[in-house]
Every structure is written in structure tokens, then in C-alpha cells.
Image (cartoon, rainbow, N blue to C red):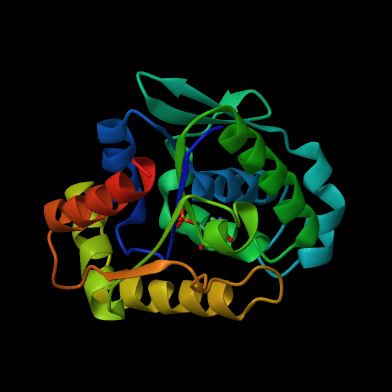
């Protein structure tokens, strides 16, 4: 039986950075489910579909074939055979991912893929609905959050390091928009699972959060 760790939380809480490190240290596979929604979002953008056109998304999502593979331990995302792992990282792709994540057909397709991955290997999987919907029996569930200002500042610094020109105000506005979209949607909204452990990373370093998660994982793994 494979062991699974589900990490959910809002945009910019540090989920992917920490989940990736945790998986590496435990020797697990890291599954970044947001990357799959981002790839789906790119598919719709390429077809000229706007973020509000939910029924077109529902009709056309069967044309998007998303695959995951690993290169030197790093998750690679393929959209109809094209490696889109770099392209999906833009702010625009993030907003489009959040928009298409409201569509039932999109979610069903991607949740199937996520469950298949978790059935094969020990995984650290991060997203918005992993503990509540994708892996309700996960061995450890963590809800990782941070204040909106902290998350916006982290994202802003990340973008600046990549040479992207933007204002802190715009980044904070994007984060608020995504929070609204992810928490208020009808299907699988972002919320903390009842049996999840809450971690607020606002005043913690990456190493501190990682240590807390590792000790939680150890207690469950060794049971
Ligand atoms: O984690 P991220 O920022 O890469 O995710 C992009 C968007 O995808 C996020 O705003 C909402 C959606 N998403 C989702 O609805 N369910 C998931 N399990 C993961 C992401």
C-alpha cells in the first residue's frame, strides 16, 4: 500500500516549494496538481477561450491530453505531447488555471490522473482539494496557509528574481482574486479537511515548516 501526504492551501502559501523538498527528503514522488490545471488553462488560452467561458471549457476539455513524467525527480507536464512545464508558470496561466478549475469535466479528468499517480507510488501531493476530495484517506493531511500580505510579498519577490516587472499591489490583487475563485467555487472549493493539521507559515522560515511536516510525517509513517 502506498503512503500519501496531502498538502492543501491558498496560492502563495509555499506549498510547492515545501512539498517538493519534503518529497525529496522522504524519497516520495512529488505531485503538483496545480500544474495540471495550469496546463489545462494553457490549452484553453491557445484555443482563444476566455476565463468566463465555462461552458466552452466543459465542451472542449476532452481535447486536452495531460501527462506527467519525471526528469531527474522534477515533475514535467505535457499538454498534447508538448512539454509546457515552463510556460505554465506565468501569472496569467495561474489565473486561467483557477478559472478552468471551476468546471466539473476539467476536475473529473484531472482528479482521475491524480488518483492513478497516488495509487502507484508514495506521494506528497499538493493542491486545493487533495485532503477533502482527491485523497480523502491520505495518511497525513496538512493545510498550509499564510496571510494574504505575506503570500503576495513572497510571490512578488519570486517574480522580481525571475526579472518579471510587476507591482506588489497587482500581485496582491491577483492573489485575492484567486482566493475568491478557489474558495467560493461550487465544486471542490478550497477548504481545510476536518482531519488536517493547520500550519500557518506567515512567521516561519521554509526550513521551520519543513521540519514540522517531517516530524508529522514520521509519526504517521512509523505507526
Ligand atoms: O497551486 P497553483 O497556484 O499552481 O494552482 C493553480 C490553480 O489551479 C489554483 O488557483 C486553483 C487550481 N487548482 C485546483 O482547483 N485544485 C487543485 N488541486 C490544484 C489547483
Residue name at image x 30 percent, y 34 percent: 26
Q: Furthest residue to the top?
A: 72
Q: How far from the left and from the top, in percent, is residue 103?
A: 74, 62
Q: Which quarter of the picture shows residue 129?
A: bottom right
Q: How far from the left and from the top, in percent, is residue 17?
A: 29, 47
Is 31 placed above or below 150 here?
Answer: above
Left or right of residue 54, residue 155 in this image: left
Along the line of sight, which residue is nearer the eye, 180 or 141? Answer: 141
Along the line of sight, which residue is nearer the eye, 75 or 87? Answer: 75
Q: Which quarter of the picture shows residue 7?
A: bottom left
Left or right of residue 42, residue 160 in this image: left
Q: Furthest residue to the front?
A: 223
Is 178 placed above or below 16 here?
Answer: below
Q: Which quarter of the picture shows residue 118?
A: top right
Residue name at image x 33 percent, y 76 percent: 172
Q: Quadrant of the N terminus?
A: top right
- Residue 140 seen: yes
Q: Quadrant of the C terminus?
A: top left
Q: How far from the left and from the top, in percent, is residue 69?
A: 52, 24
Along the line of sight, which residue is nearer the eye, 115 or 167? Answer: 115
Residue name at image x 52 percent, y 70 percent: 193
- Count of numbered circles in the view: 0
- Residue 167 seen: no
Is 66 placed above or below 69 here?
Answer: below
Amino acid at each position: 500500500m502506498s503512503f500519501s501526504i496531502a498538502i492543501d492551501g491558498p496560492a502563495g502559501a509555499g506549498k510547492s516549494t515545501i512539498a517538493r523538498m519534503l518529497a525529496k527528503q522522504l524519497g516520495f514522488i512529488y505531485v503538483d496538481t496545480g500544474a495540471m490545471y495550469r496546463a489545462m488553462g494553457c490549452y484553453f488560452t491557445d484555443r482563444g477561450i476566455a476565463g468566463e467561458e465555462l461552458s466552452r471549457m466543459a465542451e472542449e476539455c476532452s481535447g486536452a491530453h495531460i501527462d506527467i513524467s519525471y526528469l531527474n525527480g522534477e515533475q514535467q507536464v505535457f499538454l498534447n505531447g508538448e512539454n509546457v512545464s515552463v510556460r505554465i508558470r506565468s501569472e496569467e496561466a495561474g489565473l486561467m488555471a483557477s478559472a478552468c478549475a471551476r468546471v466539473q469535466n476539467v476536475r473529473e479528468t484531472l482528479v482521475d490522473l491524480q488518483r492513478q499517480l497516488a495509487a502507484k507510488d508514495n506521494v506528497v501531493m499538493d493542491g486545493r482539494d487533495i485532503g477533502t476530495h482527491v485523497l480523502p484517506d491520505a495518511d497525513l493531511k496538512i493545510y498550509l496557509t499564510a496571510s494574504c500580505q505575506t503570500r503576495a510579498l513572497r510571490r512578488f519577490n519570486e517574480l522580481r528574481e525571475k526579472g518579471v516587472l510587476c507591482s506588489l499591489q497587482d500581485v496582491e490583487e491577483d492573489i485575492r482574486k484567486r482566493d475568491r475563485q478557489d474558495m467560493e467555487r461550487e465544486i471542490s472549493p478550497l477548504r481545510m479537511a476536518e482531519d488536517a493539521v493547520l500550519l500557518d507559515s506567515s512567521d516561519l522560515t521554509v526550513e521551520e515548516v519543513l521540519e514540522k511536516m517531517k516530524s508529522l510525517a514520521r509519526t504517521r509513517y512509523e505507526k
